[in-house]
Image (cartoon, helix red, strand yellow):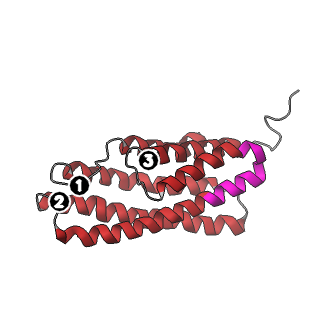
Amino acid sequence: MRTVLVALPGLVLAGIGLTHPHYLDASTAQWWQNMHIILAAIFPLLGAAQWVLLDDSPKYVRYPARVAAFGFVVYYGALDALAGIGGGAMTIANNGRSDADAPIFKIGNQLGTFGAWCFLAASIAIAVCALLKWKLKAIPGAVFLLVGSYLFLDSHIYWPKGVIACTCIALGMAATSYVSAPGRSETDDSTRT
């Protein structure tokens, strides 16, 4: 069950990303705003999934990596609140974009960039700890998680790059969860009777 739960946020984000408008104007503003209201509940679940995957990491890695996951939740959430919900609301109110909304998008993007880097930092910690503990079995999860986290730095969930990023994150989290599931030993799947 844990494996499905840590993968689900990335898969939901990838699905929503298929509908994310590439531009904001009067014709896309309503969905832009409503979609980001939905995303405000989904993005924090990515940080929660990182939190769970850090459970069996050494304390000296777990604590700073969980601070990074928390940073992602806070600062990426700020991006979605400002540029997503607020930007959509302003565009609806003004019947289109205006110069007045530029500062909202500027600060939102700055905060979101910092949040995305926090996500990458926590993902690196997860991947390194999994590789050190589970060796070869952790390679697929680590690769997918790191590739997805890197692509996410500048792609949000926009099609195609952002959808690919979120899908890779979901696959990486699922694979990492599977090899590190509680109750599995380092010899599971490698010994036969």
- Please state which of residues 103 and 48 is positioned toward the viewer in this rendering: 103
CB-based contact (under 8 Å), mark 1 and mark 2: yes
- In the rendered structure, find residue 91 and report the number of the disc placed on it: 2
Kind of residue indicated by mark 1: Leu
Quarter of the image containing the N terminus?
A: top right
126 falls in the magenta region:
yes
Quarter of the image containing the C terminus?
A: top right
CB-based contact (under 8 Å), mark 3 and mark 2: no
Magenta region: 124-138
Q: Is residue 183 visible?
A: no
Disc 1, SS: loop
Mark 2 Cα within 10 Å, few/some/many (few <14, many 20+)? many
Kind of residue indicated by mark 3: Lys
Mark before the other along the chain sequence, 3 or 2:
2
Kind of residue indicated by mark 2: Thr
7 falls in the magenta region:
no
- Please state which of residues 136 and 4 is positioned toward the viewer in this rendering: 136
Mark before the other along the chain sequence, 1 or 2:
1
Query: Can you give x and y, in whole percent of width and height, for residue 177 in the image?
Result: 64, 45
- Please state which of residues 10 and 48 is positioned toward the viewer in this rendering: 10
CB-based contact (under 8 Å), mark 1 and mark 3: no
Mark before the other along the chain sequence, 1 or 3:
1
Which residue occupies 58% across, 58% down? 51
Q: Would you name the residue on which mark 3 appears?
A: 161
